[in-house]
Amino acid sequence: MAELNEASNDATLTLPQIRERIPTVVVDDAHVIYRVHKGASGASSPVAALRRMMTRTSEPNIREVHAVKGVSFTAYRGEAIGLIGSNGSGKSTLLRAIAGLLPVNRGGIYTQGQPSLLGVNAALLNDLPGERNVVLGCLAMGMSPAEVQRQTPEIIEFSGINQRGDFASLPMRTYSSGMAARLRFSIAAAKKHDVLLIDEALATGDKGFRKRSEQRVRELRESAGTVFLVSHQLSSVRDTCERTIWLESGVLRMDGPTDEVVRAYEAFANGK
């Protein structure tokens, strides 16, 4: 990834327009290709690799997966952008590439600041209590000890993990997947981000938590951040995002106002 300049050089824009339309993410003809083994089960394990080295046999057949195919768009400060599409359409792969966790094989991705990826698989330490994970997570995001001390009770309350007991003092391994996902979102959303990437993290929890999390996304957007939301719950995308990008088989099918894009996607999905 590369850094964007703060200002635009487009002479056709007025200064107020330039200030209002500051790009945070530019995806320019991006292609992401990764390789998977298509041999027998376990063919890519360390034991199998050592066996091939000792016997001087070749690697098993490798298949390339072209997950993102020439995608281009620009995201701006203050936008909340939904990413929708069928399973395997490249949504999560694109988020990981924007976050810098996957290389771009062709084209480029340019970001303002360091994007933060929040997903249901974000790492927390299972042997530590939820409260301790909150402290470590906040410190890792750059908060001062005073900020961490002030925000920890608010984060725990926001997550709702204590609604049925003092789960904040219990190890994370005792949490359900939904409780853990809610805590991950609550930690990440406690800090303002230049670019926040959310992968299905709002799909967990009860209706009350979804409403709180959707409101928090709106607050992050209004504080000049950019939020990307991957979700199979189209209602969350409609409620949270004014713009939506539709990916299908790695190709950008549509980019525009959320209502228009979601209607087109629903017609496509119902016609399958």
Image: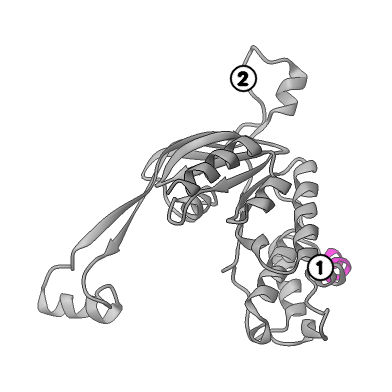
Q: Secondary structure at mark 2?
A: loop
x 53%, y 47%: residue: 98
- Left or right of 36, for residue 90: right
**Callouts 1 and 2 close, C-beta under 8 Å:** no
Residue, disc 2: 9
Q: Nearer the viewer, residue 113 or 224?
A: 224
Q: Nearer the viewer, residue 53 or 21?
A: 21
**Image coordinates for residue 227, horizontal then vertical, percent:** 67, 47
Compare marks 1 and 2 and give the one earlier in the sequence: 2
**Image coordinates for residue 229, horizontal then vertical, percent:** 63, 51
Above or below: residue 123 compared with residue 24: below
Find residue 205 and name its label. Answer: none
Q: Nearer the viewer, residue 230 or 239?
A: 239
**Image coordinates for residue 271, horizontal then vertical, percent:** 45, 46
Q: Secondary structure at mark 1?
A: helix
Mark 1: few/some/many CA within 10 Å (<14, 14-19, 20+)? many
- Left or right of 142, for residue 243: left
x 55%, y 45%: residue: 266
Residue, disc 1: 155
Above or below: residue 52 compared with residue 250: below
First to last magenta residue range: 145-152
Q: Nearer the viewer, residue 200 or 223?
A: 200
